Amino acid sequence: MNSCPSSTVTVVVIAFNDAGLVGEAVSSALAQGPVVREVVAVDDASTDGTGRVLDALAAVHPRLKVVHRAENSGGCGTPRNAGMTAATAPYVMFLDSDDVLPPGAADALVTAAERYRAPVAVGACVRRELPQGRDVPWVPGLYTAGEVIEHPVDRPALVRDTLCVNKLYDRYFLDKHAIRFPDGRYIYEDFVFTARVLAGAPRIAVVGDLVYVWHVRRTAARVSISLDRGDVGNWHSRVEAHHEAARILGEAAPELGRASKVKFLEYDLPIYLRELDPDPGYRAAWWTLTRSGLRCLTEGDIAAAGAQGRWIARLLRAGETPPADMDRLARFASAPPSLLPPYATGADGAAVWSEELPVELDGMATMPVAELPVAVEVERAGRSSVRIRVHDLYGRLAAAGADTARLSFLSRDGGEPALGHPVALEAAPAGGGWIAELPLRLGGLAVTGRRRGLRGMQAWDVRVAVRCADGSSVQAAPRPFGDLIGRRILPSSRYGVLLAQPYRTASGSLALRLAPGAEGALALVRNRFGRARAGRRPGPRPG
């Protein structure tokens, strides 16, 4: 990593009632070295002593300036704007009070920005799940280390990176284009700020370094604004922010505006739909709000989206109230998507959502097998096996010659999947699919996790891979039913005891927690206790 000796960066840290964590954030910014001229910490009228913590740090660190706001803004935009106003360095970065900057982040970004005369430099960001410490890359594959993007319109997919915190900005560029955050209680202010930046058509330099660690504390007593989705108002805020971002981008370049709308259909909409609150009142309000939000989309925008987003959008537009099979729709919004029967057809034989809601599922007949939203159900069969049922999907798997199925396990910590043994599929007695009994060797899976360096509790997402006689294959997220959910205590010759907890994720698919030995059991108990204290259901929040 090259060194940039000049003090050229202001790091703006915003904080509200985060006295216990803000010190770590500020310290990570100061530790960037001489490239950081100053750290401007904005206390948004905290009531828990955050201001006193910052003042104490400023008394020791001359590079730390503290801005005390007299009234809480209710959001993140106003304090960030205040930090930019107080900044004196030519470049600015943003940091939230519960996150950290990795060593060398500012140095790497400034070096790239100055080498390529780029008003914006971007690096890698990870979402670190705490307390487990699991890192999930943010928008993987969107950037290539060392590349320079001359114009955002050349890369419309840039609209998918809505974060402001994994980037360095030239303050002259921001001032020239009057780019600031929305003020007040404006949730998802990043969406609008990023749209304004991209609309300014900056050259963007990309570094391969990790430049931001986003801490995700799902079991915290007070979750972050973006994670607090128990009220339909959160979704309303996201829809409004998306509308504004799409408008800004569309006025700057039609390609970016459409890309923003497609991103909403393929990413934002499925996330909220698969985690939809079961309360009928909530669902009715959500349905009405979302249908209203889709009015700004043209048929061309919808047609440009992938099958999942495209079909969901058309279903929402087709009915004024939530359909009777709303749970089926939520399941289809999962990742990977899963479409449960019944499989209805229209008068012309084309696949439609249902007889009651005959929205055409265009492209179903020609979709590659690997992309089919195949539905698989799973239940316990024996002490070390599960029984699955694979539903045929408009005859597509039958035509491909569905042949074998095997379990695969995806570690939440990444890496290659752990594979079970393939088993031949048999025709289901009632027709319309296949069944098989698959071995579930939890002890062997725990050993695999330990060999990969997984300590304490292991978390695995379960998949069923179906292979066909024509060489094609598809992966499905099995949906548990029957006597499967519940903790199991298994004897283990290697660990003494193995705790296994199958559970449903937020989207309804099967996952496993494994706790080998005393260390793992303690981690599992801590995890369960943390979720109970937070009053949150188990299962990850996607994306």
Image: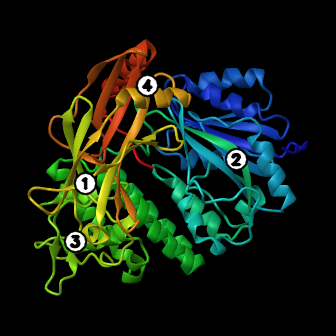
Taking the spot 75% from the left edge, 62% from the top edge, the residue there is 147
Q: CA distance from mark 3 to mark 1?
A: 18 Å
Of marks 1 and 2, the one in the foreground:
1
The residue under label 3 is 394
Q: Residues within 10 Å of mark 3 (few under 14, many from 20)?
A: some
- Residue 37 left/right relative to 334: right
Of marks 3 and 4, the one in the foreground:
3
Q: CA distance from mark 3 to mark 2?
A: 51 Å
Q: CA distance from mark 4 to mark 2?
A: 35 Å
Where's the N terminus, which quadrant? Answer: top right
Dots 3, 1 in contact, CB < 8 A: no
**As shown in the figure, which amino acid type bears the numbered disc 1?**
Leu
The residue under label 1 is 425
Taking the spot 70% from the left edge, 60% from the top edge, the residue there is 174
Q: CA distance from mark 4 to mark 1?
A: 33 Å
The foreground one among 395 and 173 is 395
